[in-house]
Image (cartoon, rainbow, N blue to C red):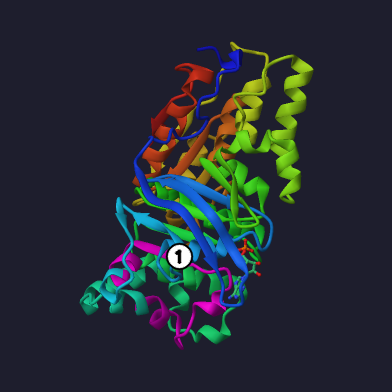
Amino acid sequence: MGYLDGSEFDLRVVTQVNEPVIKVEGLSYRYPNKTLALDGVSLEIAKGSRVALLGPNGAGKSTLFLHFNGILKPREGKVIFEGKEIKYGAKSLEELRAKVAIVLQNPDDQIFSATVEEDVAFGPINLGLSMDEVETRVTEALDQVGLLDQRSKPTQQLSFGQRKRVSLAGAIAMRPEVLIMDEPTAGLDPRMVHELLELADELNHKGLTVIMSTHDVECAYSWADEVKVLEKGKVVYSGSTPGFFSETVLVHRVGLTEPLLFEMNRSLSAVYGVPEAPHPRNIFELEQKFRRDGDRQFGRLFVMPLDGLSQERLTILRKEMPQVRFGLLGSKARKVGCANGLDTDVRFDALEKGLAEVSSGRDFVLIADDAWHEMVERRLEANREWYGTKLRLLPLS
Ligand code: ADP
């Protein structure tokens, strides 16, 4: 299949078509004050997928989320989790909530404990886990959201962004199968948004289904496998992300705009007379689509393990490879790298920046833990049709 023949293939990691983890049938919900928040909603969330839920304020997104883990009970219709209709008895709900974790929009609706670690431990303790296991999970979750050094801090003394991360840690510590985040990027600075999306990718790579509502079209466009759109309590779109943004009238009607990359692809496709599909989801993919020097040379993309990497070793490598740039990939690499004072060129968005370097003919080294090696391989594999066998991931030790 040629790249510019208009066929749409998944440009990023190819998502397997899996059975639904959550299925909703004819769901309607009216609040006690008679507001009809959901009006006959039917949809499916594929296991292991990344789903963005879009729609204007008041469309019913939060209300739908609260049905996914049984906080709200449908007035009509049903919610099915892993093939079984949700039951609303205390025991069943407890089991469900261990598997479906929600991070609410406002962290203050979620944080009740006096200190960070107590708050994150709350869920795991309720699961009846041993104190050792609770401790392991709390430490791991706080580490993942970058708050390990704040574990004893009173929750009241945290910034808004930190409180959001505490509530995310509380959800991760449950080791759920489905992670639901209600507007997780709202109120975060761009660096924190990047960290959050990277963490969501890491969790998704481990098999978690991740669902988030957002008004951030750039984030939804580059991140989601699929979008669902709600308007006035009804599903008005469910399908591929580029497919939604191609429906201009609908996009504008629900108060959104086209993402910048989508627009750039649209106008460049018109200029070059090529089909809009496939739709690039990041700058590197856009560049691949419209570059005309097909036989150019790529630089080499190396990946090296994080374990045991010291600044001394990095200094030697830099002397041996003076033209090469180095980047820390993933939350763990960034944390360890920063803590050990590693002198790297790139600390954020290292994969995209590395691919951009390599595509310009320069070499780049990704410093990453093992989980990321696999994710990068998958990402390259998903894009293999663009550059044949020219771009390979090379180990460096
Ligand atoms: P979204 O998350 O898309 O902004 P919501 O699910 O919060 O939408 O709200 C859907 C509708 O339900 C809105 O009309 C909202 O005003 C109403 N609503 C939300 N929460 C409540 C509540 N606790 N009591 C009464 N009405 C509510």
Q: Quadrant of the C terminus?
A: top left
Please, what secondary structure does the residue beneath circle 1 have? loop
Q: Residue at x 44, y 86 (%)?
A: 113
Q: Position of residue 298 (x, y in %)?
A: 55, 21
* Vertical side of 357 occupied by 152: above or below: below
Front one among 44 and 169? 44
- The x and y percentages for residue 114 are 46, 88
Identity of the residue drawn at 59% across and 64% down: 37
The picture places residue 46, in percent across and down from the top left corner, at: 41, 44
**Mark 1 = which residue?**
74
The residue lying at 34 percent from left, 51 percent from top is 307
Three-letter code for the amino acid on which mark 1 is drawn: Pro
Q: Quadrant of residue 293?
A: top right
Q: Is residue 340 visible?
A: no
Q: Is residue 109 magenta?
A: yes
Asked if 219 appears above or below 148 in the picture, the reply is: above
Question: Magenta segment, which residues?
Answer: 93-121
* Furthest-left residue in this view: 130
The answer to which of 146 and 174 lies nearer the viewer is 174
In this picture, is 388 found above or below 283?
above
Q: In which quarter of the view is residue 179 placed? A: bottom left
Q: Determine the quadrant in which ligand 1 lies.
A: bottom right
Q: Is residue 159 visible?
A: yes
Badge 1 crowding class, 10 Å Cα cut-off, few under 14, some 14 to 19, many 20 or more, is some
